[in-house]
Image (tube, grey):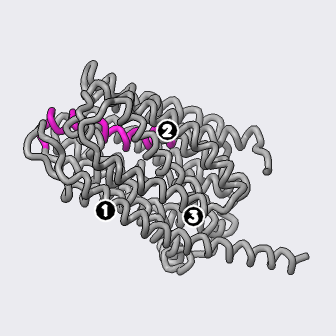
Amino acid sequence: MAPLTAYQKFIVAVIAFIQFTVVLDFMILSPLGDILMKSMDITPSKFAFVVSSYAFSAGISGILAAGFADRFDRKKLLMFFYTGFIIGTMFCGLANTFESLLAARIFTGLFGGVIASIGMAIITDLFEIQQRGRVMGIKQMSFAASQILGIPVGLYLATRWNWHVAFFMIVAVAIVVGLIMLVKMKPIAEHLKLQSDKSAFDHLIHTAKNKTYQVGFIATAMLSIGGFMLMPFGSAFLVNNVGIPQDQIQWVFLFTGISSIIIMPIIGRLSDRMDKFKIFTVGSVWAIIMVIVYTNIGVTPLWLVTALNMLLFMGIMSRMVPSTILATAIPDMKDRGAFMSINSSLQQMAGGLSAVIAGLIVDQQTKTSPIEHYDILGYVVSFVILICIYFLWKVSEVVKKKEIENSQNQIGKQ
């Protein structure tokens, strides 16, 4: 395997920390869900709109930004959107009504939703495909870190003071990360030499109409629908169905995050050595088994709930790394920014759609009554995961074909 340079390691660290703050901002709503619904007196369907509003606005901004994504230095683009994300998160912390929180989530999504796609374009520009498994393994550890550090600390602050403080914590961390990026990161503009489209709109249309790219877009959308559907009502399910006290939920996220930190680098290294689609398939089958088990449990001891949650997330995380690597291998360098932006937009909008669907499936009669139909939600998620296996197989075939064509072109040049 090709070793990483010192600067490449720095880039991985910066992108991982950026991803940590963005993921935490998105994920913190789920564990805060029970607190928010009770403190603001909002229904599960309204809370689903709070969650999905971020995703839908992120999807719209990603589409609008796609045409420009390859026409600017990627560092400058990342700084612009990260600054907007920080401002939006501050507004979330200041919100005191359902309407103001909804507006703040929409604003945050307009900026935060584009950040992941810019980060993916940077990784694809600066790292060979044989290095990306390790890079993605570290990058995806930001999900685990948000569970180990961010969510437990955020929940502690929310129960110790109030839920607003959790968002202020994210703002403080993001400001430090942004300043380091501003000072230490070099410009990333090699892709600017390859641009041929006369306008940003042309570039967007050409990228969106590329049939090879469309396979990746569909696969990403399906992955997001299956991946996000359980999240919005996860904490409410644990509190009201499983019998876990609100002040104990942080332990579930803590140990789940620890297990993810262990599994992610392993999956990353395996993805650099083995067939990525096979790894994804194994992770998907495991995820289906655990989703069905988890969504059908009743009142359960904390230790067993934590163990089941750890096993569930091992399956989910094992799907993320290989699928992301395969997606990054699809676009050409000149289209990477636009491809990643469109891909991220579809991911966000699909995630928002999944939250809305989840809100329509589940129900709750009172603030403290059990969440109904969570088991049905688990069966729906399992079915979507099966569909994902088929679409990622198509992506894998596209990547293999492209690798063969690239090898033949190199031999022809020699």
| Residue positioned 23% across, 46% down in the render | 102
At label 2, the amino acid type is Ala
| Residue positioned 45% across, 39% down in the render | 310
User: Mark 2 or mark 1, which is nearer to you?
Assistant: 1
Residue 233 in the image: x percent, y percent?
26, 45
User: Mark 1 or mark 3, which is nearer to you?
Assistant: 1
Q: Earlier in the sequence, mark 2 or mark 3?
A: 2
Residue position marked by numbered label 1 in the rendering: 380
Q: Residues within 10 Å of mark 3 (few under 14, many from 20)?
A: many
At label 3, the amino acid type is Ala
Instruction: Tell me if residue 215 comes above or below residue 290 in the rendering.
Output: below
Residue position marked by numbered label 3 in the rendering: 327
In this rendered view, identify the residue nearer to me: 125 or 82.
125
Which range is magenta?
19-42
Q: Is residue 35 magenta?
A: yes
Residue 358 in the image: x percent, y percent?
25, 56
Residue position marked by numbered label 2 in the rendering: 144
Count of labels in the image: 3
Q: Are the residues flagged by discs 1 and 3 in contact, CB closer than 8 Å? A: no
State the SS at label 2. Answer: helix
Q: Residue furthest left?
A: 366
Looking at the image, can residue 406 be seen?
yes
State the SS at label 1. Answer: helix
Looking at the image, can residue 126 be seen?
no
Q: Earlier in the sequence, mark 1 or mark 3?
A: 3
At label 1, the amino acid type is Val
Picture quarter with the C terminus: bottom right
| Residue positioned 18% across, 34% down in the render | 96
| Residue positioned 38% across, 40% down in the render | 25
Q: Is residue 115 magenta?
A: no
Mark 2–mark 1 Cα distance, whole angstroms, equals 25 Å
Instruction: Tell me if residue 156 comes above or below residue 200 in the rendering.
Output: above
